[in-house]
Image (tube, grey):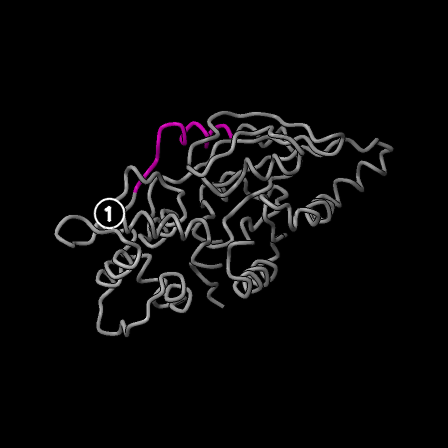
C-alpha cells in the first residue's frame, strides 16, 4: 500500500508557517503519542530550524504507557524539550509552562536585564492533521476557540487565539509532506485517521492493522473480540474475517462483510476500545 496525500492547501500551509515564524516566540509541535516519529513532519523540522520548540506527545492517554516512558527518554536524550499530554482531559498540560520557561529562559533573562515588562508568550502550534491541535488550543484557552474534529483538514486557515494575559496562540492547518519515503509511515498515519479514509483501501488498511495488533497486542485483540479458538493457523486476513464473524458482519450467504469489519476495527482502534496501543517504538 503506497500512500500519498498532499492537498493543495498544505503547500500553502507550509508557506504560512514559514512566514509566521518571525511573529512568535516559541513553536509548539504536536505529535501523536502512538506514533511519535511517524507523526513528526520532516518539513516542519526544515521550516522551524533552530527556533525554540516544545514537543508535545499528545493523545498519551490512549497510547501504551510503557512506550510513553521510552519515547520521553528518547527525545530527552536528544536534547528536545518534550512533555506528555492529553488535550481531551487536560492531563500533562500543566507541564507546558515549565517547558516554555526552559526553552525561552535566555530570552526572558535578556528582557529582564533590559527592564522590559513580561508580555504574553506568542506561540505557533504546528503538526500533521488529526494530532489534536485544535483540542490542545481549546483546552489551553478554556473555550471552543478552534474547530475540532476526528478527521483531517478541520482547520483550514491561520487564526490567533488569546489565553488571558499568558499566551497568544497562532493555530495553523495540519501539514503532511509530499512523499512518504517509508510506506510504513503513511500506513501508521492512516491507522490513526490522519489521512482521509475516502482515499484509502480500508480493507487493506485494516488487514495491516490486524497484523500489527496480532504481533504486538494480541491479548488486547483476543479479549476485545472474544476470540477463544487457536488462531495460529489463520493468516491475518482470515483473522480479520473471524473478527467480522464475531461482530455479526455477515451478508447473505453467510459470508463476512469484510469492508464493514474493516471499518469496525479501525474505528475501535482509533477510539482506544481495543486498548492503549502504540504503533512504533524508538530504536535505541
Give the side of residue 36 with respect to residue 116, left or right. Answer: left
Q: Is residue 29 above or below residue 9?
A: below
Q: Is residue 109 magenta?
A: no
Q: Residue 160: where, in percent of width, then height?
A: 61, 26
Magenta residues (range):
4-18
| Residue nearest the viewer, comparing 138 with 253 | 253
- Mark 1 lies on residue: 259
Q: Main secondary structure of the magenta part?
A: helix
Give the side of residue 180 with respect to residue 259, left or right. Answer: right
Give the side of residue 252 with respect to residue 213, left or right. Answer: left
At 77% across and 31% down in the image, what residue appears? 119
Q: Is residue 104 above or below residue 244?
A: above
Give the number of callouts.
Answer: 1
Q: Residue 140: where, in percent of width, then height?
A: 66, 37
At 79% across and 39% down in the image, what residue appears? 110
Quarter of the rendering containing residue 197: top left
Amino acid at each position: 500500500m503506497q500512500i500519498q496525500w498532499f492537498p493543495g492547501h498544505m503547500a500553502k500551509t507550509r508557506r504560512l508557517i514559514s512566514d509566521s515564524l518571525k511573529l512568535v516566540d516559541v513553536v509548539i509541535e504536536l505529535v501523536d503519542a502512538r506514533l511519535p516519529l511517524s507523526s513528526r513532519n520532516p518539513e516542519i523540522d526544515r521550516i522551524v530550524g533552530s527556533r525554540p520548540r516544545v514537543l508535545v506527545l499528545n493523545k498519551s492517554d490512549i497510547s501504551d504507557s510503557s512506550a510513553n516512558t521510552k519515547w520521553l527518554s528518547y527525545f530527552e536524550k536528544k536534547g528536545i524539550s518534550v512533555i506528555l499530554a492529553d488535550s481531551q482531559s487536560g492531563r500533562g498540560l500543566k507541564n507546558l509552562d515549565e517547558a516554555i520557561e526552559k526553552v525561552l529562559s535566555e530570552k526572558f533573562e535578556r528582557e529582564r536585564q533590559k527592564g522590559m515588562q513580561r508580555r504574553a508568550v506568542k506561540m505557533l502550534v504546528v503538526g500533521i492533521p488529526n494530532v489534536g491541535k485544535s483540542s490542545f488550543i481549546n483546552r489551553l484557552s478554556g473555550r471552543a476557540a478552534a474547530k475540532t474534529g476526528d478527521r483531517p483538514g478541520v482547520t483550514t486557515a491561520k487564526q490567533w487565539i488569546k489565553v488571558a494575559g499568558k499566551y497568544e496562540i497562532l493555530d495553523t492547518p495540519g501539514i503532511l509532506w509530499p512523499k512518504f519515503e517509508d510506506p510504513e509511515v503513511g500506513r501508521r498515519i492512516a491507522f490513526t485517521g490522519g489521512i482521509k479514509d475516502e482515499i484509502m483501501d480500508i480493507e487493506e488498511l485494516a488487514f495491516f492493522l490486524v497484523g500489527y495488533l496480532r504481533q504486538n497486542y494480541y491479548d488486547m485483540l483476543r479479549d476485545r473480540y472474544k476470540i477463544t479458538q487457536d488462531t495460529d493457523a489463520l493468516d491475518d486476513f482470515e483473522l480479520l474475517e473471524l473478527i467480522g464473524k464475531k461482530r455479526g458482519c455477515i451478508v447473505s450467504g453467510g459470508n463476512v462483510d469484510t469492508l464493514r469489519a474493516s471499518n469496525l476495527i479501525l474505528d475501535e482502534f482509533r477510539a482506544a476500545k481495543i486498548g492503549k496501543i502504540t504503533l512504533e517504538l524508538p530504536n535505541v
